[in-house]
Structures are given as structure tokens and as C-alpha cells.
Image (spheres, rainbow, N blue to C red):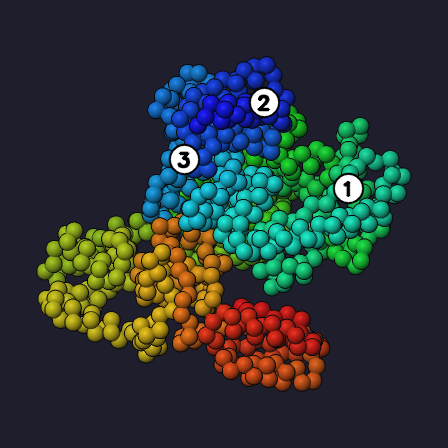
């Protein structure tokens, strides 16, 4: 670099540092600024010889992460300093954790240590999925050290996502999928809604770039129309709000690209058919009248609903019962100008700050008299689920993630206390939320005074009374009755203990029975028996002996199989051959003759199977996934399982593309809805029949009060043909929606 370039870069670094101090959400004292300055100097020294893949000096990354922590999340000077130092120990041989503790104290050293551990975990290459899931579990355990570890890690991930353009495409997909898989749900659960939305949008940008760009461009096009609509809406209610001497602002907030995409998929609609692409926010001041903060929200609600008719089933009252993240607001959906449904969010400035900053604002406004802090209680519950969980790490991460994103319901205990549970939680989940011992001894549940099954899904406002008994023990069916990670981990732990106990008895029974068959129970015999009975572990073997599912006849068969190894080998071969069906042989033949997919950069032709979860056809964007037992499975890039696979098993993902699809045929399901009229079915079948390249396999229609819905199964050669067919079907008079399932 030239001297001029170095000077320019140094000036930019100084400017970024000054900007960091300027934008801090908390008021910084002289001691705070001194601490941040000291951290900045250490970071500058620790990263002096480093550059990012984009070519810029590495110090810009910790500065940017610290800025997100200071401005967007709004944490204190301790967190800002820790954010500046988050990569120093890992990247610089000159600094160790003990040096950080000596210079900055134990708190900052603990946070930096937690961040260093997470960072070193995520850098392991080609790791097994269970190891990666275990690493996520360890990452969540750092919450016990300090919740700021996770919050700074989320800020670190956000900046990495914002600056990922210079990375290789496969790394982009891996990091973006991991972000959608774990970091966005974590940000959501901690109450960082803005960051959650940005992480999701950036995740979509790299996992489905064409979809992202399409929606982004359409939002841009409709911005002017949206602004005009907000002005129209505001004009109607301004006079009424002004008469009440309220100080307020009315703004519009576009929904995130990711949430619009999700609505399009969930509802099977196009971009234009998504009716709530933005929300209107009314933010009011209540500084002069803090006692009436909630009352003012209901007053504004009353004014809005005087002018616009509300949708009664779309009222969300998070003022009377705030979310567990501390979020408070009134959400109503009203019929706005031009006959359009529009969501209106009503919040005070304080509520708005908590919604924007989450954790930080919650503590800024926290009163000594307040009840137990929601975030703290969530961390305590999480801690129990983490530490008491013996389950497979992959299952744990999947279940934990489900609970992160789920919406909340509020139910009452018999004493009238309010409990928050994830939407979809059952009576048995409620029992475990009270206490593990209550859950494990649950005999039955009364919901609103009536006896209900343990699998009964609870609704907000239910009052639940749990009945217990000392003689009750959990059984495997309980796992079907629960949805929360806490309940499931406790049930699995209890079942495992039970299994171990039965297994110990089973081992002794097996020893006696084998002795009668002149076989010694040793490690070699156990391994042979595990393979013979197609089990996974010795505990599975002992448990099945203990419960009697492996009986004397089966043991005798095993003993005779030992006597003739050759015969058993031949039998195995025959049984394997018998399991291959004619259909499988047909598929194999087609695959061998007409392989129309190539894999990896070398464009190799390999054997593969099409995944049943998304049924890809030629022309779809796809990737190959190397399974353990079934070779390569091909999935669509927007397959419901794609994010999880790309995040957890990145090392098994193979780039794939279609190159020749002239021979093979593919099965496609189409759904059609619209207004029924005479000759409609005839019109549809004519269009399909006219197309020589489409073979119709089955068709079914239902008509109900003037509306119809139909399902058509067709066989086509590629994606282009199906797209043309869908376009033609959409043009038929009376058709409302046509979509490929």
C-alpha cells in the first residue's frame, strides 16, 4: 500500500471509532469512553496485520460489530468494549484471556472467552452434524456465563452477513443457512426483532437470490403507492387524535422480504395477493402522563376503530400481557381506505424503544418493584433444558429451534397466576412448565374445569389444573403429547433411566439364556447379536431382552445362525434381493440410461434419487445431498428441508444442475381453485390434452356453493413445460389460483 492509501485508511478507522462513540444508545461517562478507547487500542494492535477477504483492514469488523451493539442493540460500555475485543484472543498470538482479564476485568474477560469458544467451534471444517449441533448446544450454554455473549455473537453474525459478497458461493450458502437455522430464531427470542428481520432477509438473499431480488424490486416499485396510502390513512384519523391533545407520529413499516416470501408460500399466493405487505405504526408520547400510558393506547385504538372497521379476530393485546421478551403493543387489523386490510400497531415511545432494542431498553426502564425479569426467567428455563438434556444433540437443536420461533399463549394456574407457553403447547407441557416433578407424576388435566387428555392443545385464557399421582411413570407416548423442548428433554431423560434399569436386568437374563445354548456372553457375542437383530447399541439389545420382545425362539435362531455363517450370508443376499421391487428396478434402469443431472464443478454423472419431500423436476434449481445409506438425494433449493441440510451438513452438499431432460418423465401435482361454471372442467382438460408434452394421470374436482377446487396429477419432462401449462390454466375464465404443490 502507498503512504497515501495508508493515511486514508487510518483516517477512516479514526472516523469509524468516533462514530461509534457518537451513536451509542446509552449515555457514556468519561470512564466508559476511557474503557472503550483502551479496548479499541488493544483491538487495533491485535489485528494490525490482518485483512478481510474484501481487502479492507480487519479492525473495521470489530468496530462495525461494536457499532451494532452500541446503536442497534443499545448495550452498555462493557458490551461495546467486549465487542471490540471479540476476535483478539483467537486471532492474535500476543493476547490471551488472562491478559484481557488483567487489563479489563473479569466480566469482559468472561464475555470475550465465551465469544472465542463459539468462534473456534464454528471454524471446524467438515464437521459431523452431531458435532455441529453439540456446538450449538455449547454456544447456548454460554448464556449461563453472560447473556451478552450470545447478543454480541448475533451482532457479529449480522455484520458478517452484511459483508459476505466477497466469499465463495458455497461458503455464502453455508453461512446463510446456518443464520436462518439458528441465529435468526435466537435474535427473535431475545427480542431483537429488527436484527431478526435483517438476518432473515440476508439469509434469503444468499440461499434464494432470484426470489430475494424479485420481491426486493417489487417492494421498491410499490413504495410510492405505499407512502400515499399511509398519508390517506393518517388524514382520516389526524383530527380525532389532535382533539385529544395527543403527541404522536404515524409511520409505515414494510414487512420484511423473508416474511412476504413466507406468506406467499404458506398461503399459495403471488406477491400482489399478499394483502399486509406493510404495517402502520402510531407511536405516542406519554412522558407527561406515565400513569396513563396503557390507557392512551386504548384511547387511540378507540379512535382508529371509530373510523375504520376492525377485524375482530385479528386483535393482539400485548399491553395487558406483554411477550416474554418484554414487547408491549396493541396490534389491530382494520379495513382501511380503498377496501384494504391494514395492520395498525399502537405503541408508546417507551414500548417502541423496547420493541427496537429489546434487552437494553427493557433494563433502562426496569423498575425495582417489577416482578421477575422475563429474559432472566427465559434463560433459567433454557438452562434447565440444556443441562438436563440427554437427548441427541441434533434432536435438541431442532426442538429448541421450534420453541424459539413459536408464538406465545397465556394460560392461568388454578391460583390465577399467568403462565406463558409456546403456541401449540399441551396440558402436559403446562405440567412440566410448573415443575419437572409435577410433569413426571401427571395423571390427568382439567382445562376450564373439564377433564381433558394430556395431548389437549391449550389456548390463551385457559385455566389448567394438573392432577398428579405417585404411581404414574412417563411412557414413550408422552413424547407425542408434548411440543416444548423442556418437557421433551425431561421425558426422554426419564425414559432413558427406565431403559437403563430394564437393560441391566435384561443383561442378566441374556447371560443365563445363552449359557443354556452353550454360548458365552462377551463383547464379541454382544456385537454379533446387535448386528444380527439389526440394533444400534448393546443397551437396545439388553432392553429388548428385558421386556421380552426378543424371545427364546429368536435366541435359538441366532444360535443356529452362528453354526452356519455361509448359509446366513446367502440368506442375507437373497433377502436383500427380494426387497428390491420392480418399481425400484425400473427407476434404476431409467437412472442408468437417461441420467439428466450432473454434479460438482466437474459435471460428473452419478447415480441419484429424487427426494420425496420436494419432488424436483428438470429445470428446478437443485442440489445434491450425500446421505448415509441411500447415496445422493436431489432436493430443490427451496425445499422445506434445504436450510437445515445446508446449515448442518454443508460438507455433504453437492452442487447439481440439469443438462439433459429429453427422456425421463416426472410426476407433478397441480392445485386449482376458482368460481364454478358450466364447461369449466372441459376447458381445463382441453388445455392439458392440447399439450402433447403433458400426460394427465388423474383429475378430481369438488364444487361447493359456486366455488370449485381441483387436483390434477400430470407427468412432464421438465420445468419449462409445467410453467407454460400453469400460465395457460391461469388464463381460463373463472380460475382464481393455480399452483404446483
Residue at x 59%, y 33% (from the top left corner): 73
Q: Earlier in the sequence, mark 3 or mark 2?
A: 2
- Sequence-first disc among 2 and 1: 2
Let me know if residue 476 appears in the view.
yes
Q: Position of residue 329 (x, y in %)?
A: 70, 42
Q: Compared to 535, does 53 lie above or below? A: above
Q: Secondary structure at mark 2?
A: helix
Give the spatial CA distance, label 3 vs label 1. Answer: 42 Å
Taking 52 as reference, is 310 left or right? right
Q: Which SS class for mark 3?
A: helix
Judged left or right of residue 48, residue 311 is right
N-terminal of the pair, mark 3 or mark 1, is 3
Q: CA distance from mark 3 to mark 2?
A: 27 Å
Q: Which residue is mark 2?
A: 18
Circle 2 or circle 1, nearest the eye: 2
Q: Which residue is mark 1?
A: 250
Q: Label 1 near label 2: C-beta < 8 Å?
A: no
Q: In the picture, residue 511 is in which quadrant?
A: bottom left
Report the residue marked by disc 3: 119
- Mark 3 surroundings within 10 Å by alpha-carbon count, few (fewer than 14), some (14 through 19), many (20 or more): some
Amino acid at each position: 500500500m502507498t503512504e497515501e492509501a495508508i493515511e486514508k485508511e487510518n483516517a477512516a478507522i479514526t472516523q469509524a471509532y468516533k462514530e461509534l462513540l457518537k451513536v451509542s444508545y446509552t449515555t457514556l461517562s468519561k470512564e466508559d469512553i476511557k474503557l472503550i478507547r483502551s479496548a479499541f487500542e488493544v483491538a487495533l494492535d491485535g489485528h494490525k496485520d490482518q485483512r478481510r477477504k474484501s481487502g479492507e483492514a480487519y479492525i473495521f469488523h470489530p468496530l462495525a460489530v461494536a457499532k451494532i451493539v452500541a446503536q442497534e442493540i443499545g448495550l452498555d460500555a462493557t458490551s461495546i468494549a467486549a465487542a471490540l475485543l471479540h476476535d483478539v484472543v483467537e486471532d492474535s498470538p500476543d493476547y490471551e484471556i488472562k491478559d484481557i482479564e488483567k487489563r479489563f476485568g473479569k466480566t469482559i474477560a468472561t464475555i470475550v472467552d465465551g465469544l472465542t469458544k463459539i468462534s473456534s467451534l464454528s471454524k471446524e471444517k467438515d464437521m459431523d452434524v452431531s458435532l455441529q449441533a453439540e456446538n450449538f448446544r455449547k454456544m447456548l450454554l454460554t448464556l449461563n456465563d453472560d447473556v451478552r455473549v450470545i447478543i454480541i455473537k448475533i451482532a457479529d453474525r449480522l455484520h458478517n452477513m452484511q459483508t459476505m459478497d466477497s466469499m465463495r458461493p458455497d461458503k455464502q450458502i453455508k453461512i446463510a443457512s446456518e443464520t436462518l437455522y439458528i441465529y435468526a430464531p435466537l435474535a427473535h427470542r431475545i427480542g431483537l426483532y429488527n436484527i431478526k428481520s435483517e438476518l432473515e432477509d440476508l439469509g434469503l438473499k444468499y440461499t434464494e437470490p432470484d426470489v430475494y431480488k424479485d420481491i426486493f424490486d417489487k417492494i421498491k416499485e410499490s413504495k410510492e403507492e405505499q407512502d400515499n396510502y399511509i398519508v390517506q390513512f393518517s388524514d382520516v384519523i389526524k383530527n380525532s387524535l389532535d382533539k385529544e391533545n395527543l403527541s404522536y407520529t404515524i409511520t409505515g413499516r414494510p414487512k420484511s422480504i423473508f416474511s412476504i416470501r413466507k406468506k406467499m408460500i404458506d398461503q399459495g399466493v403471488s406477491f400482489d395477493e399478499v394483502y399486509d405487505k406493510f404495517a402502520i405504526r402510531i407511536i405516542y408520547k406519554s412522558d407527561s402522563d406515565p400513569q396513563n400510558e396503557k390507557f392512551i393506547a386504548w384511547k387511540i385504538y378507540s379512535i382508529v376503530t371509530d373510523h375504520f372497521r376492525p377485524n375482530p379476530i385479528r386483535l393482539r393485546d400485548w399491553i395487558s400481557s406483554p411477550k416474554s421478551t418484554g414487547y408491549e403493543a396493541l396490534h389491530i387489523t382494520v379495513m382501511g381506505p380503498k377496501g384494504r386490510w391494514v395492520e395498525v400497531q399502537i405503541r408508546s415511545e417507551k414500548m417502541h424503544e423496547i420493541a427496537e432494542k429489546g434487552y437494553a431498553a427493557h433494563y433502562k426502564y426496569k423498575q425495582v418493584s417489577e416482578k421477575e425479569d422475563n429474559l432472566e426467567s427465559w434463560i433459567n428455563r433454557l438452562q434447565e433444558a440444556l443441562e438436563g438434556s440427554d437427548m441427541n444433540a441434533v434432536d435438541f437443536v431442532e426442538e429448541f429451534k421450534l420453541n424459539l420461533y413459536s408464538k406465545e399463549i397465556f394460560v392461568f394456574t388454578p391460583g390465577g397466576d399467568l403462565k406463558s407457553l409456546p403456541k401449540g403447547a399441551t396440558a402436559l407441557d403446562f405440567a412440566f412448565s410448573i415443575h419437572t416433578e409435577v410433569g413426571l407424576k401427571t395423571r390427568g388435566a382439567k382445562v376450564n374445569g373439564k377433564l381433558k387428555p394430556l395431548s389437549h392443545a391449550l389456548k390463551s385464557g385457559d385455566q389448567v389444573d394438573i392432577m398428579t399421582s405417585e404411581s404414574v411413570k412417563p411412557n414413550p407416548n408422552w413424547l407425542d403429547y408434548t411440543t416444548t423442548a423442556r418437557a421433551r428433554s425431561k421425558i426422554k431423560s426419564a425414559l432413558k433411566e427406565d431403559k437403563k434399569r430394564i437393560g441391566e436386568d435384561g443383561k442378566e437374563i441374556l447371560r443365563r439364556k445363552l449359557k443354556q445354548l452353550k454360548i458365552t456372553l462377551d463383547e464379541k457375542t454382544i456385537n454379533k447379536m446387535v448386528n444380527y437383530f439389526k440394533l444400534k447399541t448393546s443397551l437396545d439389545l439388553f432392553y429388548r431382552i428385558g421386556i421380552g420382545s426378543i424371545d427364546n425362539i429368536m435366541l435359538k435362531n441366532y444360535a443356529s445362525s452362528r453354526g452356519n455363517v455361509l448359509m446366513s450370508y446367502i440368506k442375507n443376499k437373497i433377502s436383500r434381493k427380494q426387497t428390491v421391487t420392480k418399481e425400484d428396478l425400473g427407476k434404476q434402469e431409467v437412472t442408468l440410461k437417461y441420467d439428466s443431472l450432473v454434479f460438482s464443478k466437474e459435471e460428473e454423472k452419478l447415480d441419484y434419487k429424487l427426494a420425496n419431500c420436494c419432488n424436483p423436476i428438470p429445470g428446478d434449481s437443485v442440489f445434491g445431498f450425500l446421505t448415509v445409506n441411500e447415496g445422493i438425494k436431489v432436493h430443490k433449493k427451496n425445499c422445506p428441508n434445504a436450510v437445515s441440510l445446508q446449515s448442518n451438513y454443508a460438507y455433504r452438499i453437492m452442487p447439481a444442475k440439469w443438462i439433459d431432460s429429453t427422456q425421463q418423465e416426472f410426476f407433478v401435482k397441480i392445485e386449482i381453485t376458482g368460481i364454478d361454471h358450466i364447461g369449466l372442467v372441459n376447458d381445463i382438460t382441453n388445455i392439458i390434452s392440447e399439450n402433447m408434452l403433458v400426460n394427465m394421470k388423474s383429475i378430481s374436482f369438488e364444487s361447493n356453493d359456486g366455488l370449485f377446487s381441483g387436483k390434477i396429477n400430470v407427468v412432464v419432462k421438465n420445468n419449462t413445460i409445467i410453467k407454460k401449462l400453469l400460465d395457460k390454466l391461469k388464463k381460463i375464465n373463472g380460475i382464481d389460483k393455480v399452483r404446483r404443490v
